[in-house]
C-alpha cells in the first residue's frame, strides 16, 4: 500500500465487463513519482491525495463482486502527520533545514 496523487483520468471504451461503471484514474506515486492506473473505489477526484492498495487485495474493495484490479484507490487522505519532523525539532537537530527567517 502506498500514497499518491490523482493526476488524470483514463477512458477505455473496450474493457472487461466487470469494469463497466468503474472510474479509472491515473495516480502519481508519492514514493517514486511513477504513474499508475488505478480503479477508484471511493470517489476520488483530480489533485486529491489518495491511499492505494496493490496486488490481489486491490480487488477486495469491490467484494463480493470480483473485479480484476492490480491497484485500487481505497481512501482519500485528509492529512499526514510526519512524526519524523517533530522528533527532529524536539532534539534540536536542524541540519538540512532552513532557518525560520528564510
Image (cartoon, grey):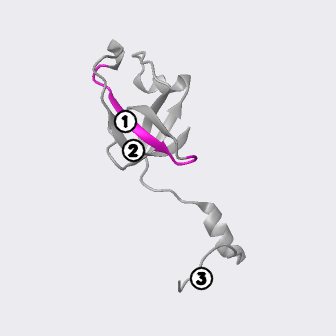
Q: Disc 1 versus disc 2: distance between alpha carbons?
A: 7 Å
Question: Which residue sits furthest bottom?
Answer: 101
- Coordinates of residue 94 in the picture (x, y in percent): 67, 76
SS for dot 3: loop
Location of mark 3 (residue): 99
In the rendered image, residue 29 lying in the magenta stretch gets the answer yes
SS for dot 2: strand
Other-residue count near label 3 (Cα within 10 Å), few / some / many at <14 / 14–19 / ≥20: few
Q: Disc 3 or 2, which lies upstream in sequence?
A: 2
Other-residue count near label 1 (Cα within 10 Å), few / some / many at <14 / 14–19 / ≥20: many
In the rendered image, residue 58 lying in the magenta stretch gets the answer no
Q: Disc 1 or 3, which lies upstream in sequence?
A: 1
Depth check: give the residue in front, 94 or 37: 37
Location of mark 2 (residue): 6
Q: Disc 1 versus disc 3: distance between alpha carbons?
A: 39 Å
- Which stretch appears magenta? 20-32
Location of mark 1 (residue): 25
Amino acid at each position: 500500500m502506498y500514497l499518491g496523487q490523482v493526476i488524470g483520468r483514463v477512458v477505455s471504451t473496450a474493457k472487461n465487463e466487470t469494469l463497466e461503471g468503474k472510474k479509472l484514474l491515473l495516480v502519481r506515486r508519492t514514493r517514486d513519482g511513477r504513474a499508475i492506473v488505478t480503479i477508484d473505489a471511493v470517489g476520488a477526484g483530480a489533485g486529491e491525495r489518495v491511499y492505494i492498495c496493490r496486488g490481489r487485495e486491490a480487488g477486495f474493495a469491490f467484494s463480493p463482486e470480483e473485479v480484476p484490479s492490480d491497484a485500487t484507490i481505497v481512501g482519500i487522505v485528509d492529512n499526514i502527520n510526519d512524526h519524523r519532523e517533530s522528533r527532529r525539532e524536539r532534539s534540536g537537530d536542524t541540519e538540512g533545514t532552513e532557518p525560520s527567517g528564510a
